[in-house]
Image (cartoon, rainbow, N blue to C red):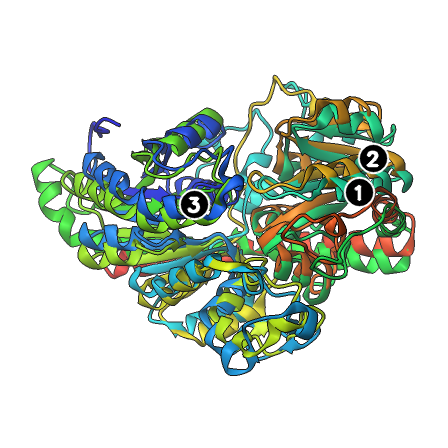
Amino acid sequence: MGTIHVESKAMCHVVAMPYPGRGHVNPMMNLCSMLATRKPDIIVSFVVTEEWHGFIKNEAKPDNVRFATIPNVIPSELDRAKDFPAFMNAVSTKMEGPFEDLLDRLDPPVTAIIADTKLVWSIGVANRKNIPVASLWPMSATVYSLLYHFDMLKENGHFPIQISEIGDEVVDYIPGMSPTQIRDLPTVLHGEDLRLLERALNTVNLVSKAQCLMFTTAYELEPQAVDALRSKYKIPVYPVGPSVPFFKLKPKNTTLAQSNGDSFASNANLISNGYAHNHEEEQAPEYFKWLDCQPHGSVLYISQGSFLSVSSAQMDEIVAGIRDSGVSYLWVARGETTKLNGCLGEKGIVVPWVEQLKVLCHPAIGGFWSHCGWNSSLEAAFSGVPVLTYPIFWDQVPNSKRFVEDWRAGWRVRKKIGKENFVSREEICDLVRRFMDGENNEIKEMRKRALELREACQKAISPGGSTETNLDSFIDYVSQIQAQEKNNFKKENNFDSATMVYHIVAVPYPGRGHVNPMMNLCKFLLISSKNHHHNHEILITFVVTQEWQTLINKNTNHAHADSIRICSIPNVLPSEEVRGNDFPGFYEAVMRKMEAPFEAVIDEIDSNVNVDLIIADTELLWAHAVATRRLLPLALLWTASASVFSMFLHHQLFLENHSFENGEKRVDYIPGVSPLRISDLPSIFHDKNGKVLQLYLQCISKVQYAKYLLFNSIYEIEPNAIDTLKSKYSFPLYTIGPLIPFYEATNNEHINYMQWLDSQPKGSVLYISLGSYLSISKEQMEELVVGLCDSGVRFLMVYRGPNKTLLSQNSNSGLFVPWCDQLRVLSHKSIGGFLSHCGWNSVLEAMFCGVPVLTFPISIDQVPNSKQIVEDLKVGVKMKERLGTNNKENDVVMRKEIARIVKGFMDFESRGGRELRETANKVREVCRNTIVEGGSSLQNLNAFLEDILQSN
């Protein structure tokens, strides 16, 4: 990528570098959008690979958020699931050099970097370039705390983990994590391959080398985890979530420019004002028109994330269960929309893509079947939607536990994670029916609790809220670091001496779930800076691979382009399209190969406008090293839940407690994490290989070296985990979530799913999306489609798979789309539920929209996210009770069980359905309250900005 020129004056230039995955890219983008909107005079360069740039280049974003690309040095996103360890390896080893080269080319020079925590090399690049770096953790703060305190698992005999032996044992000693069964810990803790755990631990270990740590959660969602981490780090910890695209909920005729200076909450409030009805001046997608025709709270939204999936047999059971339940559903199923449409009946629609947050926020949505990825978990909380949790992998398990046990805003689809986790269509049918029974008192209470989550999120992003405060504090911090270095620059360019330019480089982990929260953080920082720090010009350089820059440019508009510049490093990683082929390899590549190119980019950026701060994803293991070599403060952003963070932080406790030996054992010793089963831990906890887990643990171990820690979570949602994490770190820890683009308008005239949603009764549609990365097996997809069809529930499903026959057999039951504006879909009144993989971004969007979640976690933190949704928040129901990581036949949830669960989940007339939606609405209110004036996330955002600007 050529040099980016700034015409008139030096600015605060933040480079955002997400991990190359949808669950990372989206939160990073949401974060950058929040920063850019908060302080429109910041430039954010959003760095992705060329492939990812192609994926997201047309997505809505502030004008001052710009894409920058690095070459496609990693396996394609389309193939990474085939060898995920190889993909991870490429991310670790091949992205650093191109990213560093890119930093050298960016103009104006980089002020700070926001990098995905998984990009461990980002800290090293930042340090070499003397650029402050913030690490963005795209999972929950609780999962981060778990990784940070990993040694406690060993000390308590809970690691190594044998789920069959100790799954029921409870971990109750991880700071910031509520007592949790071993089975509810991230799957990376108890898999055969522990490489993911190793990477995670390495990632966390390096965070302390960053200048700050950012979380895509909101402080209100995970206060204990955030507080616990803040007590452990000397660097600031900023929860700046929920990192969901709530800024996209604005009517089309309201521009971002017109809203400059407005609080995030003013946009989020559009949810309650019926955003889905604002179609006069836009061609609404069909699924939104369908949602508009559905009864209030009647629709189960189903989404299993964008990466891992379930087996074909289990999918058949899910499909049959949803179909037999008779619940209206909106199912997101990428690639198999035609097949699903052919066997799901006429109660819903299947679509390949939706605007998930907008769907979850739609009044028709009554529940969310989700994989419990942290992003989806945040969106569910933000929307106030109960969750049917179906965690598959990684932090999805503890996220599921959080929804079910901690928030008590969800139910589990699968009671256990493991080879015996097959859920039949009959079970699914019954569960979905009960979950969506809005007249059921239990469901009413659940929906009330989900609404409380929504209120917490709303409070966080409201003026004075924790997210806005944290973003402001972050902007202050990076601006202050920059102030002295900018004096000469101002003299050379005849600047007013009162103007200070602060340059942030944001570098997310190269994944949608990291990139998006990081981008939103950058946008929020810009908004906060403009509103509260008028004497500072913030520039953000968002650093991604060239592939990711292409993806971002493809799916992002030019909002905040003047303040957020996308800068790319070469594609040193496996392509985003193929990273699932060897995720451990991809993850390792992120850790090993991105550092050098990133640092080179820092050098180039710094030669024009000095870099003041790096904001990096916590999973960028090298971020601390770069920041240290460059003498730059580093802020780390954790894009998953704070609870998942706590699980990784305290991973040692699992080892010490020998917890992995029994999947049913309840773990109650993870600080800040509620008791959860071993099977509810992030899936990589169970990875036998262990490479990814070890890298994760390394990333967590590095958090202590950062200066700030930011969470894409809400304090009110995870207070125990956040408080615990604050107690662990001596530096600031901020919950600034939800890092979702709730402030952005989206142009989707070519998509008809919104029109379809407009035609559906209120709350009748189940939105289905299983994430953008790992997916379920062919057998499970077939079971899911048939189960949905048999359930009779209306559905909108995002599906990108190849099986068109399956979809064609279900074309009369719902709508299948390859993509949708998820936040917008979740906000639609016809959405009654969200079948989700429980990626943290999806969780945040579900919470933000108040949509219950039918959880279908696949990997990593999605499992604990599912648990969090179902057991903690009680805004969801688990589709898969047990998580199987090898896609064996007995891992499959059968169609009858799926139909049963979906029917029950989408039955908002039942007591359970009503309570679930009431709880989801409460969660939604919690989320909203966090982003209004005085909200925890807004306050944290401001505190983060204040800190970084003053320290300059």
In this view, the residue in front, 737 or 348, is: 348
Amino acid bearing label 3: Ala
Residue at horizontal 48%, vertical 35%? 578
Report the amino acid beneath label 2.
Val
**Residue at 60% across, 44% down:** 308
Residue 765's quadrant in the figure? top right
Q: Is residue 719 left or right of residue 558?
A: right
Amino acid bearing label 1: Ile
- Spot occupied by residue 513 in the image (x, y as percentages of width and height): 51, 45
Label 2 belongs to which residue? Answer: 786
- Please state which of the two labelled residues, at mark 1 or mark 3, is closer to the viewer: 3
Does dot 3 land on a helix, a strand or a loop?
A: helix
**Residue 300 in view:** yes
Residue 86: mark: 3
Location of residue 700 (image quadrant): bottom left
Q: Residues within 10 Å of mark 3 (few under 14, many from 20)?
A: many
Q: Residue at x 65, y 43 (%)?
A: 309
Residue 318: give its label: 1
Q: Give the camera-side residue of 674 and 39.
A: 674
Q: Position of residue 714 (x, y in %)?
A: 55, 59
Q: How many marks?
A: 3
The mark nearer the N terminus, 1 or 3, is: 3
Sooner in the amino-acid sequence: mark 2 or mark 1: 1
Q: Is residue 743 left or right of residue 766?
A: left
